[in-house]
Image (cartoon, grey):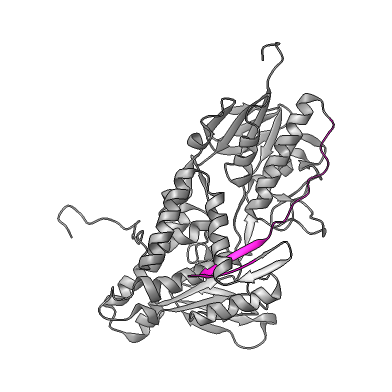
Amino acid sequence: MADGTAVHKVVIIGGGFGGMVAAQALDKTPTHVTLIDRRNFHLFQPLLYQVATGGLSPANIAAPLRSVLKKQRNTHVLLGEVTGFDLAAKAVLLKDGHSVPFDSLVVATGSTHHYFGHDEWATRAPGLKTVEDATEIRRRVLLAFERAEREPDPAVKARLLTFVVVGGGPTGVEMAGAISELARLTLSGDFRTFNPAIARVIIVEGQNRVLAGFHPQLSTKAKASLEGMGIEVWLDSHVTAIEPDHVLVKPEGGKGEARRIDTETVVWAAGVKASPLGKMIADAVGGVQVDRAGRVPVNPDCTVANRPDVFVIGDLASHPGKDGKPLPGLAPVAMQQGEYVAGVIVRRIKGETPKGPFSYLDKGSMATIGRAKAVAESMGFRFSGYLAWLAWLFIHILYLARFENRVMVLFQWFWNYITRNRAARLITGLRPPDSRGA
């Protein structure tokens, strides 16, 4: 700085919703911001299910971090993987052996899939957290239809055309609805030996209703909409085995015989756990225990234990809400925490009175089920159907990182709605034929 005072160094780990908003909120402040991520892009995860079903391409919902932050002169983006913390030296350790010093540290690395002790299921039932996850699910779903075209055995064909989604939360409901519409609408007339509309889509949910975080009235409407699309909804049911050619499902409490579903395509949407960096930062601080989901308990101002210079936000943080329960792992929570933490840091630098505790403003929740079908609740109002679907479209367009993404997604949605087509139905990840064309 011009007066010789050292610039306050802020290191943000993670370029998701919380990390990116924190970096943007520190623009034009007396700080030097370093944003570290092992990916070079910000990903809009809520729309990954549309990549997984060919509605959008990955580029539609991702934005290069350097592009998003290039006008912020006080911000430096680093591509790197964090492997540890030296809090005594106030430095972040990277996999390549380098370290990055900080005065304030913000950890916002989000969450990953949680298989509840059955990590061996990961290869058989991919979740939906990354671009790679989405393209792998897309490959499996589309390949199932392609293989069914050439399959003479009716039993094998039925197995190929059965899709199981484990989990009836927003991701599970949206994924099941998209697969159903892909089969019934988009692929109609594309195959010669069978009608894709005969595909069977099943949601397996452990609780007694889908969308358990919503009002029961909306859960009931969502279930009715799903069943109206031909989707089977198995409630009070738990997956006990996932094999290459089938899934075993038991009712709540383990009473009764397990039911077998013959399938080769399973999508996991049943749970998430915090990034491994949560345990790393908790161990580095000392005396901090992560919860069962790997989240770090934080103070009211999002700091950890007795370290006022260490903040944890987003899915990685266990922050009690007004009801005493941890705040949900939603994008609005992470974004509001990112903006709040940026304000705390700036006020400290300026020597101003500390901000009060973080308070999440819940603007509502929404989930889309299918074409012109959605549920939403906001500020005490609950609505469903076409109006909720339009609100869902508007909010998701608004939250995309760049204007370019908004235009591309809006146009793609409009075209998909008019034509019922999904232009990104690409099967990738297969080994290409050799030079002889075999």
Residue 97 at least partly seen: no
Q: In this view, does 30 lie above or below 177?
A: above
Q: Nearer the viewer, residue 253 or 269?
A: 269
Quadrant in the picture for the C terminus: bottom left
Give the magenta range: 353-376
**Identity of the residue drawn at 57% across and 55% down:** 395
**Identity of the residue drawn at 67% across and 82% down:** 254
Quadrant in the picture for the N terminus: top right
The image shows residue 146 at horizontal and vertical percentages of 31, 71
**Identity of the residue drawn at 54% across and 70% down:** 386
Q: Does the magenta stretch include residue 369?
A: yes
Q: Which of 161 and 433 is in front in this view?
A: 161
- Residue 191 falls left or right of residue 16: left
Q: Nearer the viewer, residue 297 or 328?
A: 328
Residue 377 at least partly seen: yes
The image shows residue 262 at horizontal and vertical percentages of 45, 80
**Identity of the residue drawn at 34% across and 57% down:** 428
Q: In which quarter of the image is residue 93?
A: top right
Q: How many marks?
A: 0
- Residue 424 falls left or right of residue 77: left
Give the farthest residue toward the left: 436
Q: Is residue 378 magenta?
A: no
- Residue 262 falls left or right of residue 306: left
The image shows residue 129 at horizontal and vertical percentages of 53, 55
Q: Which of 50 and 136 is in front in this view?
A: 50
